[in-house]
Image (tube, coloured by chain):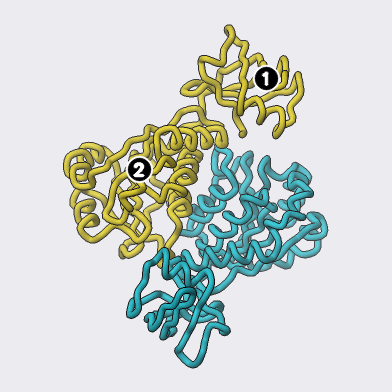
Chain colours: A cyan, B yellow
Amino acid sequence: MNLLLLTPEDFLSGDSVRVSGFRARHIIKVLRAKVGDPLRCGLLGGDTGRGQITDISTDAVSLRVTLDTPPPAKLPLTLLLALPRPKMARRTLRAATELGVSRIILLNSQRVDKSYWQSPLVDEAHLHAAMIEGLEQSGDTILPELQRARGFKPFVEDRLPALLSGKTGLLAHPYSAATAPTGITGNCLLAIGPEGGFIPYELEKLEAAGLQSFTLGPRILKVETAVSAIIGRLFL
Amino acid sequence: MNLLLLTPEDFLSGDSVRVSGFRARHIIKVLRAKVGDPLRCGLLGGDTGRGQITDISTDAVSLRVTLDTPPPAKLPLTLLLALPRPKMARRTLRAATELGVSRIILLNSQRVDKSYWQSPLVDEAHLHAAMIEGLEQSGDTILPELQRARGFKPFVEDRLPALLSGKTGLLAHPYSAATAPTGITGNCLLAIGPEGGFIPYELEKLEAAGLQSFTLGPRILKVETAVSAIIGRLFL
């Protein structure tokens, strides 16, 4: 936790804050902070800044905070991600959030097991928690916008064309012949398929909608590795 | 598992192979393979190719294999990595292996907790298993060379200069002023610090040895995210 993420409910008055539960225990036990110590803070959805610890009890920490600095800029990137295996979804969304992705759309695909959508590990609460972890890690305060597209065809036919307006549309595919572009600066939508890749019908539909496919070479990467490596390749 | 990794002990005769234990259970229960099914195979340290399942029993799978294709090329990259927290070391080494890193050197640093080096999670067996997972994922057969440098100063003064000979030396550091290079093609040594970064003394020593520092921007990334994103940025 490189940033203590605050919500309006944590504020007692103007600059006086009190956190309890998990965050307090983390400050006390992991960071081993003491009264007087500084701590980087941020308001969820708002500015970042510094806090100073004014009191520590068994399960609560009080701080005085000054929040006057905007969070780091987001990448102008929409990540269109075939729903990963539930255990990997959490880490993948955390990593995408760390890296500054603006919007994440979880997409169905022939090779996404139907049971994945029912898993509690990919419900709103779990994925919200994963993205919060990503913000706390990277010093950000703005959650990515998270959407779900459980119908592949209606999404690609009805919603994708409008989403692509004004954006470079890219599709990472192991068996594409093209190499990856670099130094993308404008708005971009990046599609990453499931383990095993999109099926040929899906590839055709995505390309027909305007996505250009590219390959990262012959290695098949885990989705969490692929997301970080491709974003590094395209944006960093 | 995208590649069934074989060792010489698995061979009954020329092209006849029998695997048991974890690998057999994975083929039977996860891949749900049947007699006659094809399976991508590779010999640890050798060629890759195809196998065909000839027999399945409760806990063993027999195959006939043809191994005639070299594994994917490695990246000409030595990763000099401050020893991560043990829980993250496994995932970080697996990801580095997936991406094709040739050599990984685990380095001590002021901000590496002394207890990390004693953890069973970073012993030879655990890290070997993590790298094997990376090979099975990415379809590779060549393990990265793994070294440990438990003394920062002797390593940087006595071993690093020779290691850097003929290589571009880079150091990812959150607070550097320089931006990352791209499209590295020659041999490279890349240093990535601990959570919290190398301390100023360590930075000075690494830069004096010939590493050029660069930043990925204001976000502080988890080491596993950083490794994948930086390798993507530099090499893919």
Residue at (74%, 42%) from the top-left corner? A199
The residue indicated by pointer 1 is B61
Dot 1: chain letter: B
In the rendered image, is residue A171 in sight?
no
Q: Residue furthest front?
A: A58
Dot 2: element: helix
Q: How many marks?
A: 2
- x and y percentages locating residue B93 in the rendered image: 45, 42
The image quadrant where one finds the N terminus of chain A is bottom left
Residue type at mark 2 is Gln
Say which quarter of the image contains residue A64: bottom left
Other residues around mark 2 within 10 Å, as few (<14) / some (14–19) / many (≥20): few
Between residues B227 and B127, which one lies in front from this camera angle?
B127
Between residues A203 and A39, which one lies in front from this camera angle?
A39
Quick check: B233 above or below A69? above
A37 relative to A101 in the view: left or right: left
Q: Earlier in the sequence, mark 1 or mark 2?
A: 1
A90 relative to A201 in the view: left or right: left
- x and y percentages locating residue B34 in the rendered image: 76, 23
Residue at (72%, 18%) from the top-left corner? B57
